[in-house]
Image (spheres, rainbow, N blue to C red):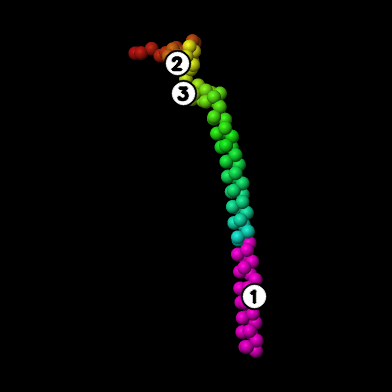
């Protein structure tokens, strides 16, 4: 009886090593592969966007737009106007009185 029990336990352990461990490893590797493929897809999309930006930056119109927008540059003969915010008012609104000093 003890021999049959030991033999059954040995078969069970063998079954676990032969089927369960490789299956778990396979599933884990499949998940890692799917995650890597997703990351690769995201990187391809980013690369395409950067390629489009690179092509756009090679045009004179885009370079001029950025120079005007970011650095305030103007062409010779042009005048740059910059709006200046109005100074804050320091007077009290009408209808209110200030307390008299004693």
Query: Label 1, on which residue?
Result: 15
Q: Earlier in the sequence, mark 2 or mark 3?
A: 3
Magenta stretch? 1-27
Q: Is residue 32 above or below residue 67?
A: below
- In percent of width and height, residue 45 lies at 60, 42
Q: Residues within 10 Å of mark 1 (few under 14, many from 20)?
A: few
Q: Is residue 93 visible?
A: no
Q: What SS does tag 1 mark?
A: helix
Q: Is residue 21 above or below residue 54?
A: below
Is residue 9 covered in magenta? yes
- In percent of width and height, residue 51 lies at 57, 37
Query: Label 3, on which residue?
Result: 71
Checking the image for residue 88, the label placed there is 2
Q: Earlier in the sequence, mark 2 or mark 1?
A: 1
Q: Nearer the viewer, mark 3 or mark 1?
A: 3
38 or 7: nearer the viewer: 38
Q: Quadrant of the C terminus?
A: top left
Question: Alpha carbon of mark 3 to alpha carbon of mark 1: how far?
Answer: 71 Å
At x 61% / y 49%, what residue is drawn?
A: 38
Q: Is residue 75 above or below residue 33?
A: above
Left or right of residue 10: residue 89: left
Q: Earlier in the sequence, mark 3 or mark 1?
A: 1
Q: Quadrant of the N terminus?
A: bottom right
70 or 20: nearer the viewer: 70
Q: Residues within 10 Å of mark 2 (few under 14, many from 20)?
A: few
Q: Residues within 10 Å of mark 3 (few under 14, many from 20)?
A: few
**Which of the 4 image quadrants contains residue 13?**
bottom right
Q: Nearer the viewer, mark 2 or mark 1?
A: 1
């Amino acid at each position: 009886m003890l021999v049959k029990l030991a033999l059954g336990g040995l078969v069970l352990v063998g079954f676990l090593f032969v089927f369960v461990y490789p299956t778990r490893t396979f599933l884990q590797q499949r998940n890692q592969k799917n995650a890597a493929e997703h990351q690769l897809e995201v990187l391809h999309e980013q690369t395409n966007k950067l390629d489009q930006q690179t092509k756009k930056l090679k045009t004179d119109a885009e370079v001029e737009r950025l120079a005007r927008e970011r650095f305030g540059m103007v062409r010779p003969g042009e005048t740059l106007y910059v709006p200046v915010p109005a100074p804050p008012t320091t007077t009290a609104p009408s209808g209110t009185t200030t307390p008299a000093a004693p």
